[in-house]
């Protein structure tokens, strides 16, 4: 068993039989730590740019963008939450802020009981068109232009593979009695 950060200070009573744990190699640990650093630094950097230049956060931007791509710029909140990768509670708070700005309206779905939908207003579309160029420049600066075309394709493939696994885990958790 390697004597590195993959094994340090892990009590036997927490892990059980340490010999059965498939510890990371030094190379795997280095790459895992690089991914963790990426996950910890990229989202705040993207968020800071949007807040500084447009007064919205990344989640709100993705809500606006998701609505802009939807038919009639309208989506049921549960579908929008999945698209924007957030909980219904987080989405509700974001929609409230976007409504106050006049960029989104919320209404009951006609003929669907308690379901609620959000619609991007013309003002919201104008705001998205105003802020999208700055966001794209930041995406290019921090990610796209730092990679070769082959690296970007590989990154996309890797991201989709990992996302598929995490989304499957999230869907499974929602099927449990106390989930979602």
Image (tube, rainbow, N blue to C red):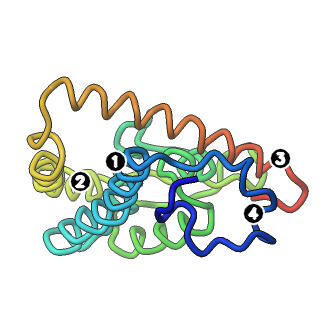
Residue 139 drawn at (x, y percent): 18, 49
104 or 165: nearer the viewer: 165
As drawn, 1 above or below 53 = above
As drawn, 163 above or below 8 = above
Secondary element type, mark 3: helix
Secondary element type, mark 4: helix
> Is tag 4's residue or tag 1's residue first in the polypeptide sequence?
4
Disc 3 to disc 2, how far (Cα)?
35 Å
How crowded is the residue under tag 3: few (<14 C-alpha within 10 Å), some, or many (20+)?
few
- Residue that mark 4 sits on: 15
> Is tag 3's residue or tag 1's residue first in the polypeptide sequence?
1
Residue 87 drawn at (x, y percent): 60, 61
Disc 3 to disc 4, how far (Cα)?
27 Å
Q: Quadrant of the C terminus?
A: bottom right
Disc 3 to disc 1, how far (Cα)?
28 Å
> Is tag 1's residue or tag 2's residue first in the polypeptide sequence?
1
Q: For residue 156, what is the image quadrant?
A: top left
- Residue that mark 2 sits on: 128
> Is tag 3's residue or tag 2's residue first in the polypeptide sequence?
2
- Residue that mark 1 sits on: 65
Q: Assess whether mark 2 and mark 1 are in contact (beta carbons under 8 angstroms).
A: yes
As drawn, 57 above or below 162 = below
- Residue that mark 3 sits on: 175
- Write the residue at 61% across / 42% down: 167
Disc 1 to disc 2, how far (Cα)?
7 Å
120 or 179: nearer the viewer: 179
- Write the residue at 72% across / 51% down: 19
Q: Nearer the viewer, mark 4 or mark 1?
A: 4
23 or 59: nearer the viewer: 23
């Amino acid at each position: 068993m390697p004597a590195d950060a993959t094994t340090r200070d892990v009590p036997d009573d927490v892990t059980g039989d340490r010999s059965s744990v498939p510890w990371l190699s030094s190379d795997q640990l280095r790459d895992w730590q690089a991914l963790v650093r990426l996950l910890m630094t990229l989202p705040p950097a993207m968020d800071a740019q949007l807040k500084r230049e447009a007064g919205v956060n990344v989640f709100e931007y993705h809500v606006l963008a998701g609505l802009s791509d939807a038919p009639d710029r309208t989506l049921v909140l549960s579908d929008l939450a999945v698209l924007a990768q957030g909980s219904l509670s987080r989405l509700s708070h974001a929609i409230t802020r976007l409504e106050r700005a006049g960029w989104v309206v919320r209404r009951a779905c006609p003929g669907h009981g308690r379901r609620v939908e959000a619609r991007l207003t013309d003002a919201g579309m104008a705001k998205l068109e105003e802020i999208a160029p700055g966001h794209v420049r930041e995406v290019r600066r921090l990610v796209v232009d730092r990679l070769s075309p082959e690296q970007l394709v590989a990154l996309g493939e890797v991201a989709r593979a990992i996302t598929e696994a995490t989304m499957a885990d999230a869907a499974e958790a929602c099927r449990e009695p106390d989930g979602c």
